[in-house]
Image (cartoon, coloured by chain):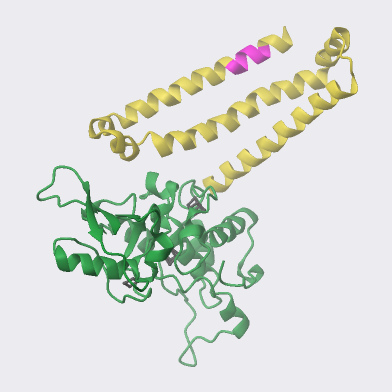
Amino acid sequence: MIHINIYRYNPEKDKFPYMQTFEFEKPKRDIMVLELLNQLKEKDPTISYRRSCREGVCGSDGMNINGKNGLACITPLSSVVQKNKLDLRPLPGLPVVRDLVVDMTEFYAQYEKIKPFLQNDVPVDIGERLQSPEDRDKLDGLYECILCACCSTSCPSFWWNPDKFVGPAALLQAYRFIADSRDTKTAERLQSLSDPFSVYRCHGIMNCVSVCPKGLNPNEAIGEIKSMLLSGKNKENIIASDGMS
Amino acid sequence: MMGSTLFFIQRFSALFLLGYSLWIMTFVFLNQPLEFTAWQIFTNQLEFLILTTLVAFISILHAYIGLWTVGTDYFTSRTLGFLHPELAKYANLIRGIYTLIFCIVGLLIIFIILLTIWS
Ligand code: SF4
Ligand code: SF4
Ligand code: FES
């Protein structure tokens, strides 16, 4: 038997959140944490969590699994159960809507702030904006982010100032557009991050890197933004990284 | 812009403090066994007085930026609210008192250093 402790909170009924324990028969084959939740939900339909693609693509089932953020759908039970025990909690730092579902408003507000779309004032003359294979390579390790929020909600700087510190996920996306040869708003993008909070609140603790289920490295992108801000380096100096951490 | 300025102040002040510490340590190391008169001559020279005066101001500036960062991380209505919702209401007051305390302590430290070396 595995003891599964799940964070439960229904603001309409509960004064305080609490942990509820479920006993779960050890499965014969290894299953993912999401599958375990689905099976528990058949017994107790009130357990709430988000999920959609169940293959690590949509980013909706980010949660805190035995103390570490991750996607339930691609986390095998065998890799997280310790001493027949598993704790499932919502992503830390964001307000809880119910059980494992958090309110992502602040997370998306930061994403919106970095203007996550291509900006280019030069009119296109041949129908599309072309990019050399070398320039395209510079986006590897950046564009793959699925906005699951595992990184930002594991970052202490984001816990303390989610309204002022942009957070690793949105900063990775900010750099994705800064590094894009087709985007012409590099200076404006950097200017909007130059206050003491937006990017400088990152102290390089690297929680973001250790949890990213896609193996991305927001800390490296943050480092690039900081050195561009500090040195006045521009796009031409950006070299493609090996993409994944 | 302000972010980069604070970043540079923190790093350059740290380098300055490191250089100063190495200078003092080298003197102590090269003058073993250290006699009081040698120390007195060293600490009475103009270079020592000027550099130590600079150290007093620079280290307080360095500490101020660091402590301001700590204050705006931990003494905010959000962070104090994690401890108790009532505390959140007094966050600005608590951060104000905290800032006042380290400003007073900082000025006191500068005063003591200047008094010690120049008197
Ligand atoms: S490296 Fe920066 S962004 Fe990543 S967890 Fe640490 S402080 Fe947060
Ligand atoms: S960087 Fe990784 S952890 Fe952060 S939101 Fe993107 S995919 Fe999720
Ligand atoms: S359900 Fe889509 S990422 Fe897990």
Q: Residue A180 placed where, x, y %?
A: 53, 74
Quadrant of the rendered structure where residue A47 is?
A: bottom left
Magenta residues, start to end: B109-114
What secondary structure predominates along the stretch shown in magenta? helix
Q: Residue B98 placed where, x, y %?
A: 42, 25
Which residue does the image show at 54% across and 75% down from the upper left? A140
User: Is residue A137 depicted above or below A38 in this figure?
Assistant: below
Front-most of A132 and B1? A132
Which quadrant of the picture is home to ligand 3? Answer: bottom left
Which residue does the image show at 38% across and 26% down from the upper left? B96
In the image, the chain rendered in yellow is: B
Which residue does the image show at 30% across and 52% down from the upper left? A94
Quadrant of the rendered structure where residue B85 is?
A: top left
Q: Residue A156 placed where, x, y %?
A: 43, 47
Which residue does the image show at 65% across and 41% down from the upper left? B11
Q: Is residue B111 one of those drawn in magenta?
A: yes
Q: Residue A125 placed where, x, y %?
A: 49, 90
In the visual, does B13 lie left or right of A34?
right
